[in-house]
Image (cartoon, grey):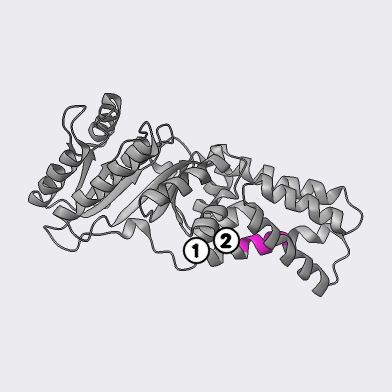
Amino acid sequence: MLSIVKTLKEKLAKTRNSFVGKIAETLSLRVKVDESLMDDLEEILLQADIGPELSMHIIDELRETIRINSVTEPATVQEHLLGIISKKLVDDYEDQKSFFSLTSDSANCPKIILIVGVNGTGKTTSIGKIAKTFKKQNKTVLLVAADTFRAAAIEQLTIWAERSDIPIFKKEAGTDPSSVIFDGLNHAKAKNIDIVLIDTAGRQHNKVNLMNELSKIGRTIKKVIPEAPDETLLVLDSTTGQNAISQAHFFNEIIPISGVILTKFDGTAKGGIVIAIKNQLNIPVKLIGIGETIDDLKEFNVNEFADALFH
């Protein structure tokens, strides 16, 4: 536990220094607790991508805490503010189950994980890392290359499969993605595979095409395994801030998203996106990417994350 938190603290240094550091700097320059200070703190929350509604709610709660505790020294405000944010974060994720505890129910019914997201977010890399983690648990894994619109996507996924010695089901570029998925899932059932990870197209030329494609994919999956997919994960680049939240809104309108993979979190100064996604969309962050290595895609543990970010 301590080593994990220490690693997270090191990886989240940029986020912590920017977010918590700005709060500390702002408070150090003040001699009294007033509305001007509240406005400045709310601006810091907005810059951290927590979102306007939640930022306002947090500051209102801070005002009440300051009133109840008769806080007059700016230096003591930080502890109260971070406590409010941390509690909000922990409460939002209180009932979240372990992602990597996912197991197949029977020999002929693999667990299906559908991965969606725009190109460039780290989608293919995330799939490779997830597959490797499940393999370390002695689970059998199959990758299904259903992003058939880009030959490079199939090649990139193949590289990950070969690197981890994990089988991949693929067809020629340009093949109907639903056809690849249909045959891939039947192959997985025949081979008694535990976990199937499906890669999907990262970008279509308009929303209607993407909606139609993902809807068709969803119907195809249910033809083979009616209760699937077990997870539909959206990959977001956390360094893009509000744009990532817009993508989450967009994809959640098209297909029900069960969780988010936040990549490149070690490179962002905007840690509030974790809170914003859950609060605004009620979609939990399930995995966070905090580096380039295979072990740097970690299961999101709210207590470890809060400890690493705020303490």
Q: Position of residue 206 (x, y in %)?
A: 38, 34
- Amino acid at dot 1: Tyr
Q: Is residue 247 above or below residue 103?
A: above
Give the residue at x 76% y 52%. 41
Q: Answer whether residue 188 is magenta in the image.
A: no
Q: Choose between 54 and 137: the one closer to the eye.
A: 54
Q: Quadrant of residue 208?
A: top left
Q: Residues within 10 Å of mark 1 (few under 14, many from 20)?
A: many
Q: Is residue 13 above or below residue 172?
A: below
CB atoms at circles 2 and 1 under 8 Å apart? Answer: yes
Residue 207 visible in the picture: yes
- Which residue extends farthest left? 190
- Which residue extends farthest right? 31
SS for dot 2:
helix
Residue 136 visible in the picture: no
Q: Position of residue 92 (x, y in %)?
A: 53, 64
- Which residue extends farthest bottom? 68
Residue labelled with disc 1: 93
Looking at the image, residue 96 sits to the left or right of residue 142; the answer is right
Give the residues drawn in magenta, as a range.
Answer: 81-86
- Amino acid at dot 2: Leu
Give the residue at x 83% y 57%. 75
Where residue 89 is drawn, which disc sits there? 2
Q: Position of residue 24 (x, y in %)?
A: 77, 49
Q: Choose between 41 and 98: the one closer to the eye.
A: 41
Where residue 287 is drawn, which disc sits there? none
Give the residue at x 79% y 60%. 77
Q: Answer whether residue 83 is magenta in the image.
A: yes
Give the residue at x 24% y 35%. 161
The residues tagged by marks 2 and 1 sit, at their Cα atoms, a distance apart of 7 Å
